[in-house]
Structures are given as C-alpha cells and as structure tokens.
Image: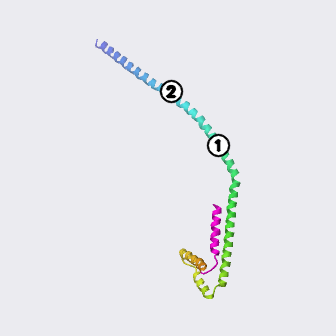
C-alpha cells in the first residue's frame, strides 16, 4: 500500500508540476508574441526610415551638385573682385607717390625761400625721431608752425580734400 500511495503522490506532484510548467510556457509564449510584434513594427519603421534617408541623401546630392555649379559660376566674379582689389592697391600706391612728390616739391620751394638760420632749425626738426610719438609731434610742429608764421595753408587744403574724399566713399 505504501507503494500505491507513493505512486499516487508522485502522480499528483507531477500533475501540479506540469500545470505550473504549462502556465509558465504560455506566459513565455505571450511575451515572445509581443516581442515578435514589436520586432515587426521596428522592421516596418526601419524600412520607412531607410526610404526617407535614401530620399534625403539623393536630395542632398542634388543640392551639392547645384551648389558646385553655382560656385563655378561665381568664380569669375571672385576673380574680378581680386583684380579690382589689386587695381585699387595700385591706385592707392600711385596716389601715395603723387602726394609724396607734391609734399617734397612744397618743401623744396619752402626751403629755397627760407633764410639760412631757419633752414638749420628745420634741419633740427627733420632729424629722424626715435619713437612714433616724437615723429607725430615733429610732423605737427612742422605743419602748424609754418602756417602760423604766415606759411601757405596747403596742409589745410589737403586735410579738406581728404575729408571730402572720405565722405564721398561713405
């Protein structure tokens, strides 16, 4: 009789084990079904996104080709701007040379008209100063001392012309 009760008890335990095992497997199957559905949705989303990404890349390639074409069209304009800059630089240097020549002529005329002792004084003033501040002070003294003593007002006319030129450029 003990054998019969043991076998019955083992059968009941096995039935309970199978029952809980079936419940666990059904739960796992439900989870796997949800994972499968999620993977299908993700696959569908990836397919849609890959199409959109391909369209975006094609559009970006079209834009790149268009920009390259437009850059090739702009190249002559940029070369013209560079040439214009070089021409303006040459004009500026020519104007600088002309103004330097004019100033030298005015100084030689003034030096020829001044008395000998004043030439020595000017020679002192025209020595090369050591600092930029000294050079600035020397140029102001040379300019405004001559005009205050009855010299020509040509410096004022040059300042006036420079101001007019700057206003015209604006």
The image position of residue 20, as x and y in percent, is: 38, 20
The image position of residue 85, as x and y in percent, is: 67, 61
Residue 52 is drawn in which quadrant?
Answer: top right
Q: How is the image coloured?
A: rainbow
Q: Is the magenta stretch mostly helix, strand or loop?
A: helix
Question: Can you identify the residue that label 1 sits on?
Answer: 61
Answer left or right for 17 relative to 90.
left
Q: Is mark 1 on a helix, strand or loop?
A: helix
Q: Residues within 10 Å of mark 1 (few under 14, many from 20)?
A: few
Badge number at residue 37:
2
Q: Where are the magenta residues, as a range?
A: 149-170
Residue sitting nearer the eye, 57 or 2: 57
Q: Residues within 10 Å of mark 2 (few under 14, many from 20)?
A: few
Identify the image quadrant of the C terminus. Answer: bottom right
The image position of residue 58, as x and y in percent, is: 64, 40
Residue sitting nearer the eye, 121 or 149: 149
The image position of residue 117, as x and y in percent, is: 60, 88
């Amino acid at each position: 009789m003990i054998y019969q009760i043991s076998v019955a008890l083992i059968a009941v335990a096995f039935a309970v084990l199978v029952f809980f095992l079936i419940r666990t497997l059904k739960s796992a199957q439900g989870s796997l079904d949800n994972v499968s559905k999620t993977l299908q949705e993700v696959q569908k989303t990836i397919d849609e996104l890959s199409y959109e990404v391909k369209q975006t890349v094609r559009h970006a390639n079209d834009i790149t080709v268009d920009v390259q074409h437009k850059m090739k069209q702009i190249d002559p304009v940029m070369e013209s701007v560079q040439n214009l800059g070089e021409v303006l630089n040459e004009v500026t240097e020519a104007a600088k040379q002309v103004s330097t020549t004019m100033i030298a002529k005015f100084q030689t005329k003034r030096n020829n008209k001044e008395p000998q002792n004043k030439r020595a004084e000017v020679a002192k003033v025209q020595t090369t100063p050591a600092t930029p501040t000294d050079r600035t002070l020397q140029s102001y003294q040379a300019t405004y001392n001559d005009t205050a003593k009855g010299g020509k007002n040509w410096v004022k006319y040059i300042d006036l012309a420079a101001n007019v030129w700057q206003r015209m450029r604006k």
